[in-house]
Amino acid sequence: QVQLVESGGGLVQAGDSLSVSCAASGRTVSMYAMGWFRQAPGKDREFVAAIRWSADITYYADSVKDRFTISRDNGKNTVYLRMNSLKPEDTAVYYCGAGGSPFSSLRNSRSYAFWGQGTQVTVSS
């Protein structure tokens, strides 16, 4: 089992920056990757970014590419999402997931076995 705890969400204005983090504990050696997804009211959970746990390989949704940066600190078992130039459409609950495998798409939420409780990010116009 892997436990995930997100933190760092909040209310910001359009154009601002914000970072969220996700700390993992438990059987972290089983993690192939960690990813960030988001879910706005009335919408499906969508992929934001992912990073492999043992390689500097990252993946981004087109909607956030060049604005968001995912990174990790293996020593702290923590993954970060730095969000720049935030837009009102970025408003959502942001969830981190852990799991994946070399044979799964890290852009698909079904590839992740463990999830955090989510953190709210609200961007006002």
Image: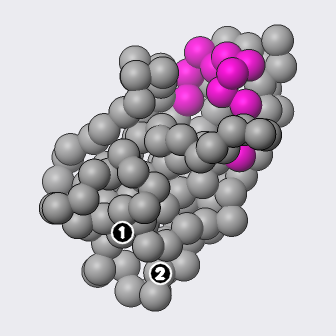
Identify the amino acid type marked 1: Gly
Splitting the image into 4 quarters, where does residue 60 fall? top left
Disc 1 packing (10 Å; few <14; some 14–19; many ≥20)? many
Residue located at (82% from left, 12% from top): 125
Q: Which residues are magenta?
A: 83-93
Residue located at (77% from left, 39% from top): 42
Splitting the image into 4 quarters, where does residue 22 fall? bottom right
Provide the secondary structure element on which disc 1 rests. Answer: strand
For residue 83, side relative to residue 118 (left or right): left
Which of pointers 2 and 1 lies earlier in the amino acid sequence?
A: 2
Residue located at (73% from left, 31% from top): 91
Q: Which residue is mark 1?
A: 99
| Front disc: 2 or 1 | 1
Q: Which residue is mark 2?
A: 2
Question: How far across and down, in percent of the image, does residue 72 sit?
Answer: 37, 53
Front residue of 75/93: it is: 93
Inter-mark Cα distance, 2 to 1: 9 Å
Disc 2 packing (10 Å; few <14; some 14–19; many ≥20)? some
